[in-house]
Every structure is written in structure tokens, then in C-alpha cells.
């Protein structure tokens, strides 16, 4: 019971962060343009990445698409981690790792409403 409540909270955090960051990318916020620009993302590429992030966040909510949403979001976070590693930016990596871990933990704990 406690694990289901904890997992529900983690899911809400992941969905909130996915929607928040996805919207920041989709609306091409200056800090997102700056970060992804150094990795040669165009504004359109950033907007597509943001839309995919928001869709992945929404997929996490539903038991049938829960796994796909988590995999897509984890893949996006892993891509950002890899770009930070290419830049030798360990601080950037350290910031992203907890978000990757949230997705991996909620995949492990599974959807709380799954029968």
C-alpha cells in the first residue's frame, strides 16, 4: 500500500516535470534554445522534442501506455545526459540523473492501477 502511494507520487512528479520541461522546449524558451542550440538543435527540432516529451508524460498516466511513456521519457533524458557527457559537463549529468532514476523506479514499481 505504501509503495503504491509512493509510486503514485513519483508518477505525478514525472508527469509534472515532463509537461513542464516539454512545454519549455515546445515554446522555445530562451534557456532551452541556448542549451539545445549548443548541440545543434534547431528551433523546430527543439519544438518536436518538446512535443514528444509532453506526449510521453501523458502516456505515463494510463496503465496501457505507462511503459511506453516511461521508455520515451527515459530515452529523452538519456539523450540529454549523453550530450552533457560529450561536453564533459558533469554538473549537467548530475542534474539529469535523478529524473532518469525516477522513470526507472516507476517502471520497476509498475502502474499503481494495473490489475
Image (cartoon, grey):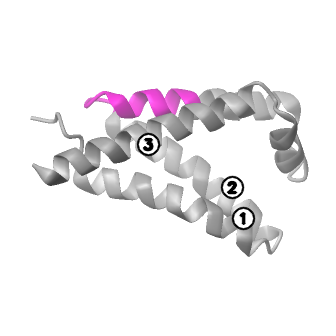
Residue drawn 68% across the image and 55% down it: 80
Q: How far apart are the alpha carbons under marks 3 and 2?
A: 19 Å
For marks 2 and 1, the one nearer the N-term is 2
Residue segment shown in magenta: 54-65
Q: Is residue 22 above or below residue 73?
A: above
Q: Position of residue 100 (x, y in %)?
A: 50, 57
Numbered disc in front, either 3 or 2: 3
Q: Find disc 1 in the rendering and name its residue.
A: 92
Residue drawn 24% across the image and 40% down it: 111
In the drawing, does residue 67 fall left or right of residue 75?
Answer: left
Query: Splitting the image into 4 quarters, where does residue 69 fall?
Result: top left
Q: Find disc 3 in the rendering and name its residue.
A: 13
For marks 3 and 2, the one nearer the N-term is 3
Q: Find disc 2 in the rendering and name its residue.
A: 80
Disc 2 to disc 1: CB gap under 8 Å: yes
The image quadrant where one finds the C terminus is top left
Q: How far apart are the alpha carbons under marks 2 and 1?
A: 9 Å
Amino acid at each position: 500500500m505504501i509503495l503504491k502511494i509512493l509510486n503514485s507520487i513519483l508518477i505525478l512528479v514525472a508527469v509534472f516535470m515532463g509537461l513542464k520541461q516539454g512545454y519549455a522546449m515546445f515554446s522555445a524558451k530562451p534557456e532551452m534554445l541556448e542549451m539545445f542550440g549548443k548541440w545543434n538543435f534547431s528551433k523546430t527540432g527543439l519544438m518536436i522534442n518538446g512535443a514528444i516529451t509532453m506526449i510521453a508524460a501523458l502516456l505515463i498516466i494510463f496503465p496501457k501506455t505507462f511503459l511506453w511513456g516511461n521508455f520515451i521519457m527515459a530515452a529523452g533524458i538519456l539523450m540529454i545526459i549523453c550530450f552533457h557527457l560529450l561536453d564533459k559537463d558533469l554538473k549537467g549529468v548530475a542534474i539529469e540523473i535523478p529524473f532518469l532514476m525516477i522513470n526507472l523506479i516507476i517502471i520497476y514499481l509498475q502502474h499503481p492501477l494495473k490489475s
